[in-house]
Image (tube, rainbow, N blue to C red):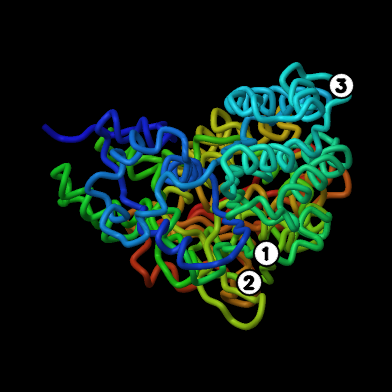
Amino acid sequence: MKKGIGIGIEDFKQMIREDCYYFDKTNYIEELLKDRTMIRLFTRPRRFGKTLNMTTLKYFFDVRNAEENRKLFKDLYIEKSEYFKEQGQYPTIFITLKDTKKNNWEECFSKIKIILRDLYGEHNYIKDKLSINEKEEYDKILFKKDDAEYDNALLNLTKYLYNYYQKKVVLLIDEYDSPLITANQFGYYKEAINFFRDFLSSALKTNSNLKMGVLTGIVQVAKEGIFSGLNNVKTYNILGDKFETFFGLSEEEVENALKYFGMTYEIEEVKKWYDGYKFGNAEVYNPWSIINYLSDRGLQAYWVNTSDNALIYDNLKNSTVDVFKDLEALFEGKAIKKEISPFFTFEELSKFDGIWQLMVYNGYLKINEKLSNDEYMIKIPNYEIQTFFKKGFIDKFLVSGNYFNPMMDALLDGDIEEFERRLQNIFLVNTSFYDLKGEKVYHSLFLGMLIWLRDKYEVKSNGERGHGRYDAMLIPLDKIKPAYIFEFKVSKTIKGLTAKAEEALEQIISKKYDIGLKELGISKIYRIGIAFKGKNVKVKYEIV
């Protein structure tokens, strides 16, 4: 009987007990123990196995139920390691902050109190060995009292556990940055950072009760003081060359899984869809997408539909025209050169390159090549992410696909009057377009065309042809289909729209932007001039 597929299971014990297929990452327990680093921070995109790996560490190290937990590692790599003697030897604290995503600080802090109450409740057995004062403080956390020492809650718990067992403590903090990312989005970042700076640093800095600490997150929040003065923290991010496949799947792991489930015939398609991430020097597959593919046996976008991308959309909306031009290059399958810092600050989001760092660390773009220091070539990693940009970008940034798709269908059907009508309607009903001032409006329209049509057309922008530079060109991959040349103009008045559209069309003709297309075997060419004024649009065209 084949093992099951544990979609959504993030607890190692549950994964093993329910006999689910498990990608054995326990070799990294050995690596963690070999390395003497006190505190480690691992930053990876969401859904790359961070929580599952953290619970694996929990069940390995925890002194509680040690014999029972020992059975979970039967036939896994670590069982045969000399470091298996470390199993069940340490009091262990596991805390996840993933559920602290709230609209304001009051709600967030209330959730933190609940998390700490449950954590203290889990270790309630140690109260017998606490002093009167310590019991009093312990109970304040248990009963969510206002005067409890919440900022020192982790530090105090490590002390209590050490005194109880006379053994050093393993501290595991999952998704440490989740509340900070949400706080930044909803405008209570100052309150959040003030709390978490003390909450985390007090437990991690010069804590003699710790054996080791392991944190996970998406980004390393720097310059805000969380890790200031913590010289015992080492960060393993996507740029580093150690622990590369601790999170994510290697090609060998994916191939073995496909063989196990009898699906080797689609390996190349699987690679096209879900491979392409680069952590350090290793090519990595997205584990969430792989396990869903193994379950559904269908190639589709799994990972990109699992989270709110509001932070990315917000920053794209406020981006410069240069960002749009870089997006054009990315959508064309090219790599672009950007500075990617190992540290992340929310202040950088307002700067030119902030959006690129955000997209790299969140897994929407990959490091393609390191140039020098913090300078890298970055690109879209795989076909799944392309579908995110195709559907997500159009639906949530440009305009609903309910409007955009019929407009593009009308264009491809050669019904330019219907194309104009639907384009006009998009400008009337969609505020996103209106919010994009000046040149960004036309770039956004073009980007939508580019990512919607890239399976059928070679989509070019601002290229040299004839006696000048055209704004946009669609060259069909199937030469039986027509080509399209676009020129965009801005009118100062609504009355001048028609004249500007005619001027745009005449420019295509006079500058011979369509030269050479007939020689490619294309028999029909649409020359299309488009003029804009606010939410008004006019199209003029001819067919040759």
Residue under label 2, please give it.
511
Is there CB contact under 8 Å for labels 2 and 1? yes
* Residue 229 vertical position relative to residue 412 in the rendered view, above or below: below
* Residue 498 in view in this figure: no
Residue on which disc 1 sits: 507
- The residue wearing badge 3 is 146
Specify which label sits upstream in the sequence, 3 or 2: 3
Residue type, label 3: Asp
- State the residue lying farthest toward the top: 143
Say which of marks 3 and 2 sits in front.
3
Estimate the spatial distance between the alpha carbons at disc 3 and disc 1, rounded to whole Å.
71 Å
Residue 197 in percent (x, y) is at: 81, 47
The N terminus - image quarter: top left
Task: Say which amino acid is labelled 2.
Answer: Lys
Q: Which mark is residue 129?
A: none
Give the alpha-carbon distance from disc 2 to disc 1, as whole Å: 6 Å
- Residue 181 location (% of width, % of height): 72, 42
Residue in front for this viewpoint, 79 or 445: 79
Q: Is residue 407 left or right of residue 315?
A: left
